[in-house]
Image (tube, grey):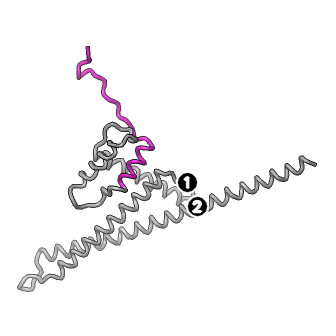
Amino acid sequence: MPPRPELAEPRKRKNFTENDDILLLKQVITDEPFRHGGGKVIDKWDKVAEVLLSSPAFSRETLAGKTAQNRTTLLLAKKKNAAEARLSGVEVTLSEKEALAEAAEAQKAEIAEAAGETVRKLAVERLKRPAAEDGEPTKGTKLVKIVGILAEYKEKELAAKKDQWEAERADRIALERGRLVVERQRQIDNQRLIEVLTVLAKK
């Protein structure tokens, strides 16, 4: 006799695996759900979730668009913490997931910057339109001016964040190159030591 619905054991919540995170970030980079326009934002995340669930490589049985969005936000936040660790002098080797998170963060910043530029251009175009016949600025004109100022501020803020991201990326590359140089030198030293010991052993 099957158990009554209210007594059935609830399905355990499945965490994201490393591979799930990688697939999620790849799909985010492909679908660009951060880009506004052409429907609601959550609809774009629903599409991301739908594609992932259709993949046999994705281990989760269920995934909502909101969950995909929240998980991506968490991964990008972890990427930021890793970047701060690198800047503090901690040696960090970038994994595939972290590299994808970095790429997704850069894409998100570029999309936001482009959106700010579009708003600024629209504000400038509206400012060029003639005001009311009495020469006094209308409420709409004042609002457009405010929007233009806010858009310009946002644009500068995004540019500063992009510069910071590029600087962090340059630091990461420099640290990785330094690590490779040290590792290569260590291998050379070990090889030389082995050669010396081999010669001495033959004497």
Q: Secondary structure at mark 1?
A: loop
Quarter occupied by the N terminus: top left
From this view, report whether residue 197 is shown above or below residue 125: above
- Horizontal side of 191 relative to 126 (left or right) equals right
Residue 179 among magenta residues: no
Q: Secondary structure at mark 2?
A: helix
What residue is pinned by disc 2?
A: 175
Residue 189 in the image, given as x and y percentages of width and height: 76, 56
Residue 9 in the image, given as x and y percentages of width and height: 31, 24
Q: Which residue is rendered at x = 32% and y = 55% of the image? A: 31
Identify the amino acid type marked 1.
Val
Residue 191 in the image, given as x and y percentages of width and height: 77, 53
Residue that protrudes farthest toward the right in the picture: 203
Q: Which residue is rendered at x = 44% and y = 51% of the image? A: 78
Q: In the image, which disc is placed on residue 64?
A: none
Are discs 1 and 2 less than 8 Å apart at CB?
Answer: yes
Residue 114 sits in quarter: bottom left
Q: In the image, which disc is placed on residue 92?
A: 1
Q: Residues within 10 Å of mark 2 (few under 14, many from 20)?
A: some
Q: Which circle's residue, 1 or 2, is located before the other in the chain?
A: 1
Residue in front for this viewpoint, 53 or 168 = 53
Q: Which residue is rendered at x = 46% and y = 50% of the image? A: 97
Q: Which residue is rendered at x = 37% and y = 35% of the image? A: 14
Residue in front for this viewpoint, 141 or 14 = 14
- Horizontal side of 64 relative to 167 (left or right) equals left
From this view, report whether residue 102 is shown above or below residue 55: below
Mark 1–mark 2 Cα distance, whole angstroms, equals 8 Å
Q: Residues within 10 Å of mark 1 (few under 14, many from 20)?
A: some
- Horizontal side of 187 relative to 81 (left or right) equals right
Identify the amino acid type marked 2.
Leu
Residue 3 in the image, given as x and y percentages of width and height: 26, 18
Q: Which residues are magenta?
A: 1-28
